[in-house]
Amino acid sequence: MSQNKKEIRRKFREVCLKRDKYTCVMCGLKASSPEEAEKIFDVHHIVDRNKLPNGGYVLENGITLCHADHEKAEHYHSTGVALPGFSIEELYEKIGSSREKAVVSANKLK
């Protein structure tokens, strides 16, 4: 990746929050403003960023989650077992994406 990593992360977060309308995709918690969204949401890499080209910092691999739902999604990354509703496939379905789409987009990052 030739761009500054901080800029790549910022842009990834920004586009995911905007696509998800500043709302937790899982529980529906909604921020009153983009500024509030910065405080109350995480943007989760559905497939671990170390397992996708160029860190997987693409819209097709990010999902907006409140802190509680982010912990549930991270359960899979730390244990290998997804909590109900939080499998990789279910998270991709929530945003209309797939691992294949994420790989294609991640390969385009420079």
Image (cartoon, rainbow, N blue to C red):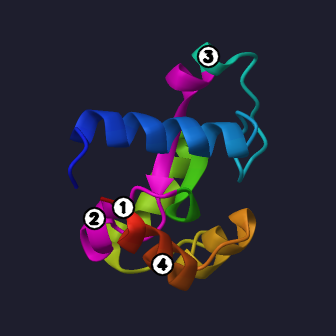
Residue 23: x %, y % from top left: 73, 38
**The C terminus lies in quadrant:** bottom left
Task: Kindly identify which residue carries mark 4.
Answer: 104
Q: Which residues are magenta?
A: 37-58
Report the amino acid beneath label 3.
Glu
> Which residue is denoted by mark 3 in the rendering?
36
Secondary structure found at label 4: helix
Of marks 1 and 3, which one's residue comes earlier in the chain?
A: 3
Instruction: Say if the magenta span includes residue 44.
Output: yes
Q: Could you tell me which secondary element the residue under label 1 belongs to?
A: loop
Camera-side mark, 3 or 4:
4
Residue 54 is labelled as 2
- Labels 3 and 2: the sequence-earlier one: 3
Residue labelled with disc 1: 109
Instruction: Report the residue at 54% width, 35% height from top.
Output: 14
Cα separation, mark 1 vs mark 3, equals 29 Å
What residue is at 53 percent from the left and 85 percent from the top?
Answer: 100
- Name the residue: 70% across, 63% down: 95
